[in-house]
Amino acid sequence: RSASTVDIAPACAVLAAWDGVYDLDRAGPVVWREMMSQLNAPELRNQGRLWAEPFDPKHPVDTPSGLAPAPPDGPDPILQFLAGTVQTLQAAGLPVDVTLGDAQFALRHGTKVPIHGGNNFDGTTNVVGFGAPGSILDPAFDETKRELVAPNSQLAHVGSDTGYLVNTGTSFLMALAFTDDGPQARGFLDYSNTEDRTDPNYLEATQRYSAKDWRTVAW
């Protein structure tokens, strides 16, 4: 990222209005992810340029916490991360208030399906991302080409689309309740029941997952 003066006020407003949820209609996840992706793994856990308090295994939910105070001299790293984020989004052609559903998607036989959830920078339990399809031998996935927008970012140009391409992560998810009438379960299978791209149901499971449309588990 080149050195320049960057207006970070709109990005600050996006983060201030965000509730921390990684749903399709939220505008904050992309800004936060691009900020966090500029740090290495230890910095995401320990006290330093980002956190005032390091991770404490005795308080795993509440730590790390608190933004690190600005240094007495020189620029504030937090503001530099945010400025770098604005530059990356500009390079991608995306506004700072882009929603997660507009920026993160799966491509299923030419159809773009918005995907909720976060990656390893986001601190979510619904983890999705892009990786080499090592568990399948599907040439359509092998032929997918991404052109990354900037260093330390997963934003990429994929054909005529730009954003976070998802091809891995949450695949089967089930919630189970033991009731007086026996076990009751709901679930998602987000990648379809068929490899046949001409099947009318090829998209159905992924679209239901995108819409959070739970399926009843019969057995």
Image (cartoon, helix red, strand yellow):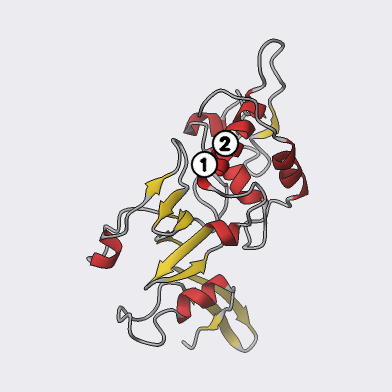
**Residue identifier under label 1:** 91
User: Helix, strand, or loop for circle 2?
Assistant: helix
Q: Is residue 57 visible?
A: no
Question: Is residue 118 positioned above or below 196 on the image?
Answer: above
Depth check: give the residue in front, 192 or 79: 79
- Which residue does the numbered mark 2 point to in the structure image? 87
User: Where is residue 208 shown, x and y percent of the image?
Assistant: 53, 77
Which amino acid type corresponds to the residue marked 1 in the rendered image? Ala
Which of the 4 image quarters holds residue 52? top right
Please name the residue shown 40% across and 56% down the image. Answer: 158
Residue 151, above or below 127: above
Choose top left, top right, bottom left or bottom right for residue 25.
Answer: bottom right
In-front residue for pair 148/205: 148
Q: Give neighbour class at mark 1: few <14, some 14-19, many 20+ (Cα, 10 Å).
A: few
Left or right of 7? Residue 131 is left
* Of 175 and 193, the residue lying toward us: 193
Left/right of residue 182 with respect to residue 200 in the rendered view: right
* Total numbered labels: 2
Task: Estimate the x, y position of residue 60 in percent, counting from the top left.
Answer: 62, 41
Report the residue at 52% width, 41% height from top: 91
Q: CA distance from mark 2 to mark 1?
A: 6 Å
Position in image of residue 182 (x %, y %): 58, 86
Query: Can the viewer see residue 210?
Result: yes
- In percent of the image, x 45 and y 43: which residue is there? 149
What residue is at 45 percent from the left and 72 percent from the top? 190
Q: Within 10 angstroms of label 2, few (less than 14), some, or many (20 or more) residues? A: many
Q: Amino acid at mark 2?
A: Gln
Residue nearer the viewer, 186 or 135: 135
Q: Are marks 2 and 1 in contact (CB under 8 Å)?
A: yes
Kindly state the secondary structure of the residue where label 1 is placed.
helix
